[in-house]
Image (cartoon, helix red, strand yellow):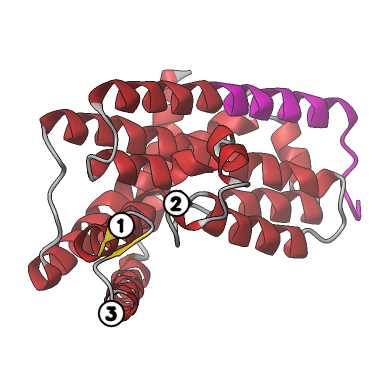
């Protein structure tokens, strides 16, 4: 299994390596996103020192580091899987002796490694040199943040894979994919920390897997949690990761049992 996963990851890395220019353009795009967020929050905090317990320095670091991390773990597993199902190409995957989940997971890992070197690192260096972001709160926060980002990648992948599997039930998944994209942007805390949402909905958001994609790693990074709470939040992320990956395995097993390719 490890050898197969490595083979899929290596193949994905090499394929992306042949399209380096596309990702160099992506570096510019993510830098623009971070820059817009930087000056937007500067305008919001122009007349006040704190908003919802956040100061300007922490808020700018939160959004910029979030974009850097997102540039590393982002993948299109949902679109790719939905397209294979819609076109009937998934039939060939059903005939293979390897798991489709392992194939997509290995490809996502390869893409993440590529993005880390060719997008995340350049974007981070440029933003850090120009804007001078805050460093992690302390050594423990830095270590927990690293583990949290790894789990964020797995959560993002699992949600995408499950979304792609929904193409078996829906003929046109594009609207659902856009809705999922927007929901993750907000519910994960990618655009706004959870403290900015109405107090009535925060408990429901906190118990969902979505904050583990963005809000939890960044709260750890900025030291907004005590050491014990950091460990609890990382453990909570790990539990959701296990649940969702098992859901991916069961979902794919169900598709194998009763799949009918749309259009053929």
Q: Earlier in the sequence, mark 2 or mark 1?
A: 1
| 3 versus 143 height, above or below | above
Residue 195 numbered tag: 2
Q: In the drawing, does residue 184 fall left or right of residue 109?
A: right
Q: In the drawing, does residue 134 fall left or right of residue 144?
A: left
> CA separation, marks 2 and 3?
19 Å
The answer to which of 4 and 223 lies nearer the viewer is: 223
Q: In the drawing, does residue 159 fall left or right of residue 91?
A: left
Q: Residue at x 72, y 23 (%)?
A: 250
Q: Residue at x 72, y 30 (%)?
A: 252
Residue extent of the magenta highlight: 242-264
Secondary structure beneath disc 3? loop
| 109 versus 69 height, above or below | above
Q: Select label 2 or label 3 by which is in front.
A: 3
Q: Residue at x 16, y 28 (%)?
A: 140
> CA separation, marks 2 and 1?
9 Å
Secondary structure beneath disc 2? helix
* x, y percent for residue 29: 35, 75
Identify residue for label 1: 54
Q: Earlier in the sequence, mark 1 or mark 3?
A: 3
The answer to which of 19 and 114 lies nearer the viewer is: 114
| 76 versus 243 height, above or below | below
Q: Which quadrant of the figure has residue 45?
A: bottom left
Characterize the local packing of mark 2: few (<14), some (14-19) or many (20 or more) Cα atoms within 10 angstroms: some
Q: Is residue 102 magenta?
A: no
Q: Residue at x 65, y 30 (%)?
A: 248
Identify residue for label 3: 47
């Amino acid at each position: 299994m490890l050898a197969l996963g490595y083979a899929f990851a290596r193949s994905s890395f090499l394929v992306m390596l042949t399209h380096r220019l596309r990702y160099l353009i992506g570096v510019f795009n993510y830098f623009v996103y971070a820059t817009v967020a930087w000056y937007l929050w500067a305008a919001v905090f122009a007349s006040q020192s704190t908003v919802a317990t956040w100061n300007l320095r922490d808020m700018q670091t939160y959004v910029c580091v979030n974009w850097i991390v997102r540039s590393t773990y982002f993948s299109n597993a949902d679109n790719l899987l939905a397209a294979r199902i819609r076109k009937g190409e998934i039939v060939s995957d059903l005939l293979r002796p390897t798991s489709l989940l392992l194939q997509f997971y290995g490809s996502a890992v390869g893409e993440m490694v590529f993005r880390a070197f060719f997008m995340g690192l350049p974007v981070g260096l440029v933003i850090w040199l120009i804007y001078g972001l805050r460093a992690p709160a302390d050594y423990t926060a830095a270590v927990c943040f690293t583990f949290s980002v790894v789990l964020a990648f797995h959560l993002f992948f699992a949600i995408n894979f499950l979304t792609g599997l929904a193409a078996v039930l829906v003929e046109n998944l594009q609207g659902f994919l856009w809705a999922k994209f927007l929901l993750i942007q907000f519910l994960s805390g990618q655009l706004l920390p959870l403290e900015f949402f109405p107090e009535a909905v925060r408990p429901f958001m906190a118990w969902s897997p979505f904050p583990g994609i963005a809000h939890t790693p960044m709260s750890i990074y900025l030291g907004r949690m005590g050491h014990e709470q950091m460990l609890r939040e990382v453990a909570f992320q790990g539990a959701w990761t296990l649940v969702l990956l098992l859901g991916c395995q069961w979902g794919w097993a169900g598709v194998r049992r009763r799949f009918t390719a749309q259009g053929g």
